[in-house]
Each structure stands twice: as C-alpha cells, then as structure tokens.
Image (spheres, grey):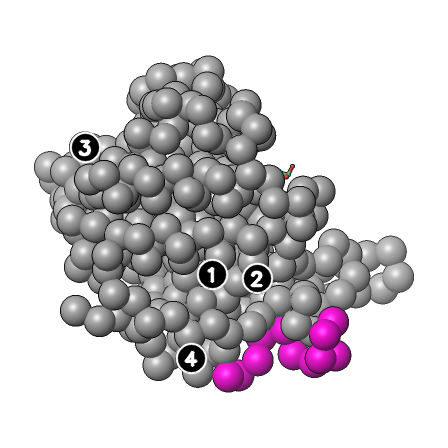
C-alpha cells in the first residue's frame, strides 16, 4: 500500500537527522510518498514570516500523518512555541513517549520499559500570561475536565492494548488543589473503568526521586503537559539520552511523530547527531500506518547496530556520523 506523509525537517539537527530517517524508513520497503513542508525558526528567519505556515498545516491535514524534526523556540524573547501551536492547532492531545532500555546502550539501568503519556493541549502551555504591573507577571494554568478525561482514557486504552499492568498518575494536587485536583479526579474516574489495570498516584517531586532510584517499578505514566515535558527528558536520561527516545503526538484525526529531543544547536550542522530518535519515531509511525512487519524489522535492525556498538554516534560512545549510523541500520535491514 502506498502511504503519503508530510515531512517537516525542522531546525538545528532536524534536517540532517530527518534526511537519514527518511532513507532508513524507505529502506524498510514500505512505500511512502513524502511531501516536504517547512516550519520553525529557520522558516521565519528565511521568509520573515510565519514559523508555522498555513500550507504546512494543510499538508498535515491532507496526509493525516507527519514525521517532524525539532523546532527551535527562543528563550524569553521571540514568538510562542511552534510545537505548542502545532499540537493545539491539530488537536494532537496525546503525547506518547516509550522509554525503554536498549541493548548495547550504556546507562545506569538495565530494565526500563515505560511509556510517558503527556496531555498536549493545555496546562501552563496555553501561553496565557500577562504583566500585571512592572515586576509582577501572571501565567495561567488551564486544566479542563474534557481534556483530562480523554488523556486518561488514552493512557488506560494504551495500557490495555499493550498489555501493560499499571498506570501511575503524576500530579501536584497537594499544592494546586483545584487544577491538578481536577486532573486527578478525572484519572480516578477513568481508572474505575479498567479494573484489570492497577492505578497509583504520585506527587511529581516524589515521582522524580522514585524514577531515578528504580525506574523498573514504572509502567504507564500519565500526566499533564508540563510534568510530561520534564519527565520525558528525565526518562531519556535513564536509558542513554535524548538520542534514543522517540515520540508521537496523536489526535482523533491526525498524528505527528517526532523525537523527544530539541534542535540541539550545540551539535547542529556537524553531521554527528544521533538519527535514532527520529527514526524510531518513524517506526512508531509505521505501526500507526499498519506496517507492523516493517516496524518490527526496523526495530531488529536498530537493535543489531546498537548491540554491535561499532557504528554508533558520539552520544552513545562511538565515532560514527549521522549518515554512517544510518547506513549501518540500512545494511542490517537489507539482510533481514
Ligand atoms: P535539546 O534536546 O535540543 O538538546 C539537549 C542536549 O541533548 C544537547 O546537548 C544536545 O546536543 C543533545 N542531543 C539532543 N538530541 C540529540 C541527538 N539526536 N543526538 C545527539 N545528541 C543530542 O534541548 P535544548 O538544548 O534544551 O533545546 C534546543 C532547542 O530545541 C530549543 O529552542 C527548544 O525550544 C527546542 N526544543 C524543541 C523540541 C521539539 O521540537 N519537539 C523539543 C525540545 C526542545
């Protein structure tokens, strides 16, 4: 079957990593017609315009599926985040980030296998903030029953589908009694509909401590936007870093697949970025497109390259370039 996918190379290491991901995904034999579209800081610099052109949103709506590189968001100054606008604009409410120990990738733990489920459309990321008087600013945290129920439902459905045993809701409802309180209340309501799946709650600070002490006790982690953003990177640190953690933003109608990492300006343009995170996001995309066998083969090829450990990028202790690592994965795919 022929698939069509929008490709957003993005900023920083995005284009170099996305280029290799596309080569690898094409090498799985799945027939994908890619439409490359632009978004991000680079676009607004180049054309002096909108970092999220309407034509890019239209392409994603047309194909329903996109593979996306990271987009730079300036700190303090500049425009609001394009990532946030994209997720809200397409109502990609569920951010799904599997965090798993990989063979051959050095880390402090050997048995991490969890999924971070992050609500993607509200919380402090609504960007509702204003200057009250000079020296005093206010930022609103927005939590709704509707969004909390649907993300909880998503997490429990995923747990059921993937035969996972436990969902842990992460919150700060001891302090934000109303907003995180509502989130938690929704998680509890949904949990009651899934009696076969254990349900637990943890305050976010304690959750961070428990995660670094013993991540193996976690399974599905369910949380609002900000905690999900932070815990995703913490999770990446448990399994070898941002170079090896994929992700997906899923809505009722559209899905955008992207790595957890950002545009990594410190290594951009050097050809040394790890292509795995975006490639593995592409693997999640293959599953979403119903290409289970190809996704499985891709997984095997990645694991083989990691196990051998000869052709891996600098972040994993090797010396390979982005392209060389991609070539190694493609060689394995050719042999499967
Ligand atoms: P970052 O994730 O870009 O980089 C953090 C560290 O991880 C850096 O040392 C970087 O070199 C390393 N790293 C990240 N990806 C890597 C890869 N594939 N291979 C090897 N090393 C890798 O986070 P940072 O520096 O905080 O953010 C940079 C920019 O990215 C910011 O403008 C931020 O807003 C944006 N960002 C965008 C995201 C997205 O588009 N989904 C997600 C996170 C950040």
Whole-Å distance between the Cαs marked 1 and 2? 7 Å
Label 3 crowd bin: few (<14), some (14–19), many (20+), radius 10 Å: some
Sequence-wise, the earlier of marks 3 and 2 is 2
Identify residue for label 4.
59
Q: Is residue 1 magenta?
A: no
Sequence-wise, the earlier of marks 3 and 1 is 1
Residue 38 placement: quadrant: bottom right
Element marked by disc 2: loop
Element marked by disc 3: loop
Identify residue for label 1.
68
Query: Horizontally, is 243 left or right of 221 in the view?
Result: right
Residue 72 placement: quadrant: bottom right
Label 1 crowd bin: few (<14), some (14–19), many (20+), radius 10 Å: many
Tell me if residue 203 can be seen. no
Ligand 1 under 8 Å from disc 2 Cβ: yes
Identify residue for label 2.
10
**Contact flag, marks 3 and 2 (Cβ < 8 Å):** no
Sequence-wise, the earlier of marks 4 and 1 is 4
Label 4 crowd bin: few (<14), some (14–19), many (20+), radius 10 Å: some
Query: Horizontally, is 193 left or right of 220 in the view?
Result: left
**Quadrant into which the N terminus falls:** bottom left
**Contact flag, marks 3 and 1 (Cβ < 8 Å):** no
Identify residue for label 3.
165
Q: Vertically, is 188 above or below 42? A: above
Q: Give coordinates of residue 147: x percent, y percent.
A: 37, 62
Ligand 1 under 8 Å from disc 1 Cβ: yes
């Amino acid at each position: 079957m022929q698939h069509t996918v929008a490709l957003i190379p993005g900023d920083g290491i995005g284009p170099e990593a996305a280029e290799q991901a596309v080569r690898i995904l094409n090498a799985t034999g799945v027939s994908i017609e890619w439409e490359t579209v632009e978004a991000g800081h680079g676009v607004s610099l180049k054309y002096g315009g909108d970092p999220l052109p309407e034509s890019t949103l239209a392409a994603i709506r047309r194909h329903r599926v996109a593979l996306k590189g990271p987009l730079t968001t300036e700190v303090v100054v500049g425009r609001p985040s394009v990532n946030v606008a994209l997720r809200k604009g397409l109502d990609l409410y569920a951010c799904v980030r599997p965090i798993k120990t990989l063979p051959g990738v050095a880390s402090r733990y050997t048995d991490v296998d969890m999924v971070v489920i992050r609500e993607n459309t509200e919380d402090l990321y609504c960007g509702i903030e204003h200057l009250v008087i000079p020296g005093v600013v206010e930022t609103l945290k927005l939590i709704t029953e509707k969004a909390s129920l649907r993300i909880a439902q998503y997490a429990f459905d995923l747990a059921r589908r993937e035969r996972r045993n436990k969902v842990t809701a992460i919150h700060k409802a001891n302090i934000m009694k109303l907003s995180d309180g509502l989130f938690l209340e929704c998680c509890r309501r949904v949990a009651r509909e899934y009696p076969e799946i254990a349900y637990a709650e943890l305050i976010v600070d304690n959750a961070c401590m428990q995660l670094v002490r013993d991540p193996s006790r976690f399974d599905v982690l369910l949380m609002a936007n900000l905690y999900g953003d932070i815990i995703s990177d913490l999770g990446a640190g448990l399994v070898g870093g941002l170079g090896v953690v994929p992700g997906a933003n899923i809505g009722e109608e559209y899905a955008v697949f992207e790595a957890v990492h950002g545009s990594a300006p410190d290594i951009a343009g050097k050809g040394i970025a790890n292509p795995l995170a975006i490639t593995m996001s592409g693997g999640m995309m293959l599953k979403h497109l119903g290409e289970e066998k190809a996704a499985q083969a891709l997984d095997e090829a990645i694991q083989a390259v990691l196990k051998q450990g000869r052709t891996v990028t600098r972040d994993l202790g090797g010396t390979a370039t982005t392209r060389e690592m991609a070539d190694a994965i493609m060689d394995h795919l050719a042999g499967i």
